[in-house]
Image (cartoon, rainbow, N blue to C red):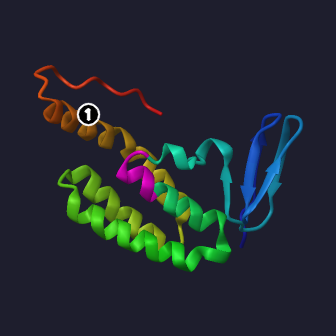
Amino acid sequence: MNKSMRLGLKAGERLYVNGAVLRVDRKVNIELLNDVKFLLEAHVLQPEDTTTPLRQLYFTIQMMLMDADDAQSTELMFQVLLATLQKTFENETILTGLKKVERQVAKARLFDALKTLRALFIEEELIVGKTKVMIEGELSEPRSFAAA
């Protein structure tokens, strides 16, 4: 049994459906009546925003959703990047999140994997901030990062 999903889009907003990019010219509600792979524009990460390891992993999964024709090679890239991150991170919250992402991708729950990764961005920013302070030799506390 398929569940329908209603989406509300603002004028000029984009929706990515099965690799196609749709832009609406006015406020509109759309009901998806069958299972499709889609992303709302607000959830799409641009290449120039892949500035951290978790954002790079997010972008890879995003590409699996948006470019089904190249999903197999993108999935291989995902596996390599995931394995590297699992060996690199020591933070338990991030490691637990990465295991969850791995399970979600294995079950083809790519949108859920993206949601899981978005929730880890703040934790990663705190780690990056602490690392930056240590590298620069500053004695001050790292600055806090606002939620994206």
Q: Residue at x 73, y 66 (%)?
A: 18
Reply yes or no: does residue 147 show up in magenta. no
Q: Position of residue 48 (x, y in %)?
A: 52, 44
- Label total for image: 1
Reply yes or no: does residue 53 show up in magenta. yes
* Residue sitting farthest toward the front: 136
Q: Residue at x 47, y 60 (%)?
A: 113
In this image, 5 relative to 65: left or right?
Answer: right
Secondary structure, magenta segment, majority class: helix
Badge 1: few (under 14), some or many (20 or more) residues near its Cα, within 10 Å?
Answer: some
Q: Position of residue 61 (x, y in %)?
A: 51, 63
Q: Nearer the viewer, residue 39 or 49?
A: 49
Q: Position of residue 77 (x, y in %)?
A: 44, 72
Q: Residue at x 11, y 28 (%)?
A: 137
Q: Nearer the viewer, residue 67 or 33?
A: 67
> Can the viewer see residue 107 in this picture?
no
> Can the viewer see residue 123 in this picture?
yes
Which residue lies under the disc numbered 1? 129
- The N terminus sits in image quarter: bottom right
Q: Residue at x 63, y 41 (%)?
A: 42
The quadrant in which residue 102 appears is bottom left
In magenta, the rendered stretch is 51-57
The quadrant in which residue 142 appears is top left
In this image, 39 relative to 59: left or right?
Answer: right
With respect to residue 54, does 77 lie above or below? below
Element marked by disc 1: helix
The quadrant in which residue 17 appears is bottom right
* Residue sitting farthest toward the top: 140
Inspect the image, locate mark 1, and give the three-letter code of the amino acid beneath it: Gly
Q: Nearer the viewer, residue 6 or 40?
A: 40
Q: Nearer the viewer, residue 136 or 75?
A: 136
